[in-house]
Structures are given as structure tokens and as C-alpha cells.
């Protein structure tokens, strides 16, 4: 993505798009008057991978706050103090391992049967009752938590959002505004708000690997990642379609995680 950004025959105009209103970025891109430069294409601070980032992190976190408030309004919190405390305990330990203690992390278990979890930019983490019950130990819960935290530090929502902005700019005439529903979907609320714009397979794999590193830093047993995803795979047909649409097949990710754990000498698994 970063290799194929807009270019212009005229002398490049160096613009910090992260400081521009989104609408102006779209106009400029569509009109061909904007050349994207750093910080639009920046190495990811965790992975080093080059990413197209057209949105300011603080701005995205602000949007996520609204979405989070909406989520909390529309879903009942699970009335189980022990499980809420458990998620909080694991969440804090993983958040510490990310080094992003500047973020306002929040961890909530919602009273829903599905084995699902999600994260919003800025560290708002929602787990469903179903996935709390599936994770037998804190180590297994840390597997999911590490993965979700990996989406945050991997800046996956910002990357997905930027891709949407760029694609819209390419497709639409100058002056077209980004549909706010697309923005919401890009935040990762596809399943929740009835719109689906899942993370890419590459982002999911990246979150898995980042998550294993956080597990290890936080002194969780990384081998239990394999146990957990095995349990998820066994669930088979019990997994809701929304989980399948937003996450890769558990069986296929197990192989990659196993190889990574063994390569790092954290196994054998
Ligand atoms: Zn994911």
C-alpha cells in the first residue's frame, strides 16, 4: 500500500496529512493534488513494517471513545464480579507489557454467549462471556488479550481506516465525504454495528505474533496459546458466523503460532 501512494508530476507538495481534516485529505487525494509523505508512510513502532497512516492516533482514539460509549449502552455488562476482576487482572498485565501505559485501557465482559472479543483504538477492550468461559486459565485468557493488544500497538485500525480513505478517494469524485458508517466499520465495529470490515489476514497473523511476545513479557505460559486455539477449533460449529467473518480459522493460525513459539525457544509445543 505504501509503495503505491498518490504521485504527481508537478513538484511534490509536502503535506502532513495527519494534521488535515479528513475531508480535505479525501479532496486532495481525489484531485491528485496531494503527495503523501511521512508521516503518512511510517514504520510501525512494534513491527517495523511500513504502514500507510492517514489519520492521527489521538483523533482515531477520540472516535473510538464514542463507539465504546455506544457499545456499553447497547450491551449488558456481565454481572459477575469475579470474571470482571479476572479480565481486569490479565488486561492490566498485558497492557503493562505493551509499554503503552499512556493509553486509557478499559476491560469489560459483556453478557453475551458468543466466544468473541474485540478491541477499539486507544485500548477499549470488550470480551464476551462465551470467550471467558472457553479460556480455562489466565494464560489462555492472556492469549486473546495479547492478540487484541497487538491490534492496538500494531495500529491496525488506523491502517484499515487509512486504506478506506485512500480507496474512497480513488473511487469517488473530489469533494466526496467519507461515509461515517465506513468509518465506524473501519474502527473494528463491523460485527457489532452490522457492518463488516474485518482486519486483514496479515494483520490477524501479526496480532497473533505480537500477542505471543506480550504473553511472554508478562510471564504467561505462551504454550497455552496452542491449547486455547485448539479449544476454539474444537468448538467448530458453535462459533458464531460473526467470529468466522472477523477472525481466521483457528486451525490455520495454530500452525503459525506453534512455529513461532518453537523458533523463539519457548516450546516445545
Ligand atoms: Zn484479531
Image: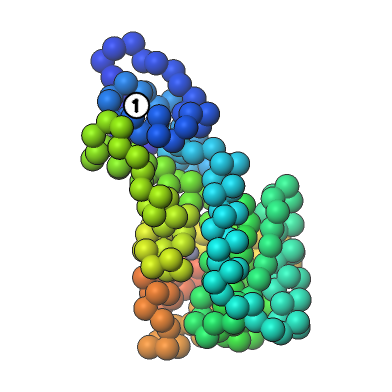
State the image coordinates of residue 85 (x, y, percent, origin top left): 76, 76
Q: Nearer the viewer, residue 76 or 250?
A: 76
Quarter containing the N terminus: top left
Quarter containing the C terminus: bottom right
Residue 139 drawn above or below residue 263? below
The residue identified by callout 1 is: 28
Q: Number of marks in the image?
A: 1
Residue 229 drawn above or below residue 165? below
Q: Is residue 15 visible?
A: yes
Residue at 34 percent across and 26 percent down: it is 28
State the image coordinates of residue 210 (x, y, percent, origin top left): 57, 57
State the image coordinates of residue 118 (x, y, percent, origin top left): 53, 66
Q: Residue furthest front?
A: 73
Density class for disc 1 (Cα within 10 Å; few <14, some 14-19, many ≥20) is some
Residue at 46 percent across and 73 percent down: it is 254
Q: Is residue 210 visible?
A: no
**For this view, does 154 lie left or right of residue 166?**
right
The residue tagged with tag 1: helix, strand or loop? helix
Residue at 71 percent across and 84 percent down: it is 80
Q: Nearer the viewer, residue 214 or 187?
A: 187
Would you say the beta carbon of the disc 1 residue lies within 8 angstroms of ligand 1?
no
State the image coordinates of residue 99 (x, y, percent, origin top left): 71, 50
Q: On the image, which quarter does residue 66 sit in?
A: bottom right
Residue at 51 percent across and 80 percent down: it is 115
Residue 180 drawn above or below residue 266? above
Q: Nearer the viewer, residue 226 or 111?
A: 111
Q: On the image, which quarter does residue 88 sit in?
A: bottom right
Q: Nearer the viewer, residue 202 or 178?
A: 178
**For this view, does 16 lie left or right of residue 219?**
left
Amino acid at each position: 500500500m505504501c509503495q503505491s501512494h498518490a504521485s504527481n508530476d508537478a513538484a511534490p507538495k509536502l503535506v502532513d496529512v495527519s494534521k488535515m481534516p479528513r475531508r480535505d485529505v479525501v479532496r486532495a487525494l481525489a484531485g491528485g493534488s496531494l503527495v503523501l509523505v511521512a508521516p503518512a508512510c511510517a514504520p510501525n513502532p512494534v513491527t517495523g513494517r511500513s504502514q500507510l497512516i492517514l489519520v492521527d492516533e489521538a483523533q482515531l482514539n477520540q472516535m473510538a471513545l464514542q463507539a465504546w460509549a455506544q457499545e456499553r449502552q447497547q450491551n449488558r455488562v456481565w454481572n459477575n464480579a469475579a470474571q470482571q476482576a479476572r479480565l481486569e487482572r490479565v488486561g492490566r498485565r498485558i497492557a503493562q507489557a505493551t509499554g503503552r501505559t499512556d493509553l486509557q485501557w478499559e476491560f469489560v465482559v459483556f453478557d453475551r454467549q458468543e466466544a468473541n472479543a474485540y478491541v477499539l483504538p486507544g485500548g477499549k477492550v470488550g470480551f464476551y462471556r462465551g470467550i471467558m468461559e472457553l479460556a480455562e486459565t489466565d494464560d489462555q485468557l492472556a492469549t486473546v488479550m495479547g492478540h487484541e493488544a497487538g491490534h492496538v500497538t500494531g495500529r491496525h485500525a488506523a491502517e484499515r481506516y487509512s486504506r478506506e480513505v485512500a480507496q474512497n478517494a480513488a473511487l469517488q469524485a473530489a469533494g466526496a465525504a467519507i461515509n461515517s458508517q465506513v468509518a465506524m466499520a473501519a474502527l473494528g465495529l463491523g460485527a457489532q454495528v452490522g457492518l463488516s470490515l474485518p482486519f486483514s489476514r496479515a494483520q490477524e497473523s501479526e496480532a497473533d505474533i505480537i500477542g505471543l511476545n506480550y504473553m511472554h513479557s508478562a510471564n504467561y505460559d505462551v504454550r497455552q496459546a496452542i491449547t486455547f486455539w485448539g479449544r476454539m477449533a474444537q468448538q467448530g460449529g458453535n462459533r458464531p458466523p460473526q467470529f468466522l467473518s472477523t477472525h481466521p480459522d483457528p486451525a490455520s493460525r495454530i500452525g503459525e503460532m506453534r512455529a513461532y513459539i518453537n523458533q523463539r525457544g519457548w516450546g516445545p509445543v
